[in-house]
Image (spheres, rainbow, N blue to C red):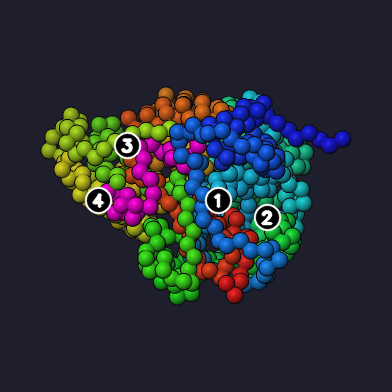
């Protein structure tokens, strides 16, 4: 007898929400997969069901990205070298990684979030949540091997998760998962089954497993410094790693996944990461001259790039944003009136147009983006220097305030944002000095400066970002990536409630209060949510525009010299 597919008790209600037009196809797909329904079953339901007129009041979960031209699988060719501009850092522990690096194509994740913002199993075969969302059973994909030839098993999962949850490691995964998962509650059932017994309900476990530092580690070989022995389950292995210069990754024989044509991946022979630096002009020149084949522009591609017949450009709306962050444990930002005064000095539409060429969406000062399904629509606070000046006076600064804002010089839109803010905050009484430093220097001090602008990357759900960036641990200490040191008891309680709420509409209602708290007494300003671009040589096929972890799906790239 054929085994009936597991179905969570909320799935019938989810189907009803789609039938009545209250959620989009993408919201249905994301939530169905999170609840353990296979992609095949979810697509089968969507194909057989036409929704009624939509009454949705929020944007779709993500903009549909452009994609490279599809071709018959029989046309896929093997061989070739793909060169991309990227940071080649001195990575010791992947669990401490704060941005993408070539390690994420050597090591892999249990899950993967695609360009449509939907999360699927990757090193997992499937997952099953309990009805109360407090027990998650993870079924590992069998037959996956490390580059050493050893099998990937539950022992690797337990080892890696214990590294995440070890305070001495200092991983952002501790902030993401540590409030609901304790090391002793990770159970190995057998070599290919792991059960997570959670302290509280959590809807987004599969998506948490695709956070940037969540790559799997080999328990046999990892000794604390990955570069000393870069073992992974991925399609490529490290051949050369010159910090600050380049990394050469060679195709690995015996990789577990197959391509669209049914043949083994990867199609390419090599990936080469070239550390050109953060100067966007240098990266653009490298692309157009053929030194590299792809790069991710930090700001909207200029006309010369758009008109280049040899270059293709993909674009997708994301939750990527520059965050104006103020440390609440350092003067003058301990006073919420000072924080709110600076936030009132943001002319957001002006900032979007000048810093980002209008390529994005303005939003309220909370770290929840319109492309995330739980976003609650809110009014945008208008630019008001007079009100800001009154708040400064009330806070004890009638003669204004001298402040220094630190930014990474390699992010052109961030520098522009700071320059506009300096000009527009002057009428309110802020005398702002800009401290522009190289990006690598900024990452050395991003949690330490009292006022700065930090680039935060896309995450599929807001309930992934908020616990990492704006909560404290069980002892009341800010989690590792809480750069502003802001903790709010009511905010944390509501966030815990939202993370355990299956119903999309109910979660959105909770998010309304979460967002309001962050806007009214939080520690950040959000000028806009930016589109992300990928510019690349047209002779390479199979690329998609990434929304989150940059390189994980690039193993399907292939080279067509006739394109």
In space, the residues marked 4 and 1 are separated at their CA atoms by 32 Å
Indicate which label's residue lies in the foreground, 2 or 1. 1
Kindly identify the residue that appears in the image at 38 percent across and 69 percent down.
Answer: 304
Q: CA distance from mark 2 to mark 4?
A: 46 Å
Q: Residue furthest right?
A: 1
Q: Earlier in the sequence, mark 3 or mark 1?
A: 1
Looking at the rendering, the stretch of residues picked out in magenta corresponds to 350-374
**Residue 76 visible to an observer of this rendering:** yes
Give the mark toward the camera: 2 or 4: 4
Cα distance in 3D space between marks 3 and 1: 28 Å
Please name whichever residue, 365 or 430, is drawn nearer the observer in this view of the structure.
Answer: 365
Q: Is residue 496 left or right of residue 431?
A: right
Q: The N terminus lies in which quarter of the figure?
A: top right
Q: Position of residue 346 (x, y in %)?
A: 27, 43
Numbered circle sitting on residue 380: 3
The residue beneath circle 1 is: 115
Marks 3 and 4, how far apart at CA = 18 Å
Residue hosting label 2? 233
Disc 3 or disc 4, which is closer to the eye?
Answer: 3
Q: Residue at x 68, y 68 (%)?
A: 75
First in sequence: mark 3 or mark 4? 3
- Provide the secondary structure element on which disc 2 rests: loop
Query: Considering only order in the chain, which callout, 4 or 2, is on the residue closer to the N terminus?
Result: 2
Instruction: First in sequence, mark 2 or 3: give its number.
Output: 2
Q: Residues within 10 Å of mark 1 (few under 14, many from 20)?
A: many
**In x, y percent, where is residue 474?**
50, 29
Which residue is labeled 4 in the image?
420
| Residue 12, percent from left and from top | 65, 28
Q: Nearer the viewer, mark 2 or mark 3?
A: 3
Rendered image quadrant of residue 408 = bottom left
Q: Tell me the number on the disc at residue 526.
A: none
Please indicate whether residue 344 sits to the left or right of residue 447 in the image.
left
């Amino acid at each position: 007898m054929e085994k009936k597919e597991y179905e969570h008790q909320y799935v019938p209600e989810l189907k009803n929400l789609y039938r009545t037009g209250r959620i989009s196809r993408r919201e249905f797909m994301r939530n169905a997969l999170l609840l353990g329904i296979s992609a095949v079953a979810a697509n089968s339901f969507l194909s057989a069901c036409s929704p009624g007129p939509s009454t949705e009041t929020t944007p779709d979960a993500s903009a549909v990205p452009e994609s490279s031209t599809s071709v018959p699988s029989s046309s896929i060719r093997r061989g070739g070298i793909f060169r991309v501009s990227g940071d080649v850092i001195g990575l010791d522990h992947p669990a401490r990684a704060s941005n993408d690096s070539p390690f994420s194509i050597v090591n892999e994740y249990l899950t993967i979030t695609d360009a449509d913002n939907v999360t699927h199993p990757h090193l997992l075969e499937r997952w099953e949540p309990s009805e109360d969302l407090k027990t998650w059973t993870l079924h590992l994909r069998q037959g996956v091997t490390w580059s050493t030839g050893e099998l990937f098993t539950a022992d690797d999962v337990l080892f890696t998760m214990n590294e995440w949850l070890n305070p001495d490691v200092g991983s952002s995964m501790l902030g993401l998962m540590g409030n609901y998962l304790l090391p002793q509650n990770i159970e190995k059932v057998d070599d290919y089954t792991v059960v997570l017994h959670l302290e509280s309900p959590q809807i987004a476990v599969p998506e948490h497993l695709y956070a940037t530092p969540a790559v799997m580690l080999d328990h046999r070989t990892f000794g604390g410094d990955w570069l000393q022995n870069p073992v992974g389950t991925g399609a490529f292995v490290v051949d050369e790693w010159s910090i600050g210069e380049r990394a050469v990754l060679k195709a690995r024989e015996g990789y577990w996944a197959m391509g669209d044509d049914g043949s083994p991946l990867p199609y390419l022979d090599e990936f080469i990461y070239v550390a050109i630096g953060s100067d966007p002009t240098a990266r653009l020149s490298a692309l157009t001259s053929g030194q590299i084949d792809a790069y991710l522009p930090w700001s909207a591609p200029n006309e010369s790039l758009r008109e280049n017949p040899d270059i293709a450009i993909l674009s997708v709306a994301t939750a990527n944003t520059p965050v104006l962050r103020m440390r609440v444990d350092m003067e003058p930002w301990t006073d919420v009136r000072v924080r709110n005064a600076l936030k009132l000095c943001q002319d957001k539409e002006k900032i979007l147009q000048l810093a980002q060429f209008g390529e994005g969406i303005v939003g309220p000062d909370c770290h929840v983006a319109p492309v995330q399904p739980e976003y609650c629509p809110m009014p945008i606070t208008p630019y008001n220097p007079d009100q800001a000046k009154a708040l400064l006076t009330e806070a004890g600064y009638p003669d204004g305030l001298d402040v220094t804002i630190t930014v990474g010089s390699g992010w052109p839109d961030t520098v522009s944002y700071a320059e506009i803010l300096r000009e527009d905050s002057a009428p309110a009484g802020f005398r702002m000095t800009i401290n522009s430093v190289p990006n690598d220097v900024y990452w050395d001090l991003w949690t330490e400066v009292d006022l700065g602008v930090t680039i935060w990357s896309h995450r599929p759900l807001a309930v992934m970002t908020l616990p990492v960036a704006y909560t404290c641990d069980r002892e009341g200490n800010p989690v590792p990536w809480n750069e502003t040191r802001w903790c709010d008891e009511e905010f944390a309680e509501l966030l815990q409630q939202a993370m355990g709420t299956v119903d999309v509409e109910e979660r959105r209602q909770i998010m309304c209060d979460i967002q309001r708290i962050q806007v009214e007494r939080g520690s950040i300003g959000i000028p806009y949510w930016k589109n992300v671009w990928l510019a690349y040589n047209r002779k390479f096929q199979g690329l998609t525009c990434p929304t989150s972890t940059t390189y994980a799906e690039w193993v399907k790239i292939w080279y067509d010299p006739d394109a």
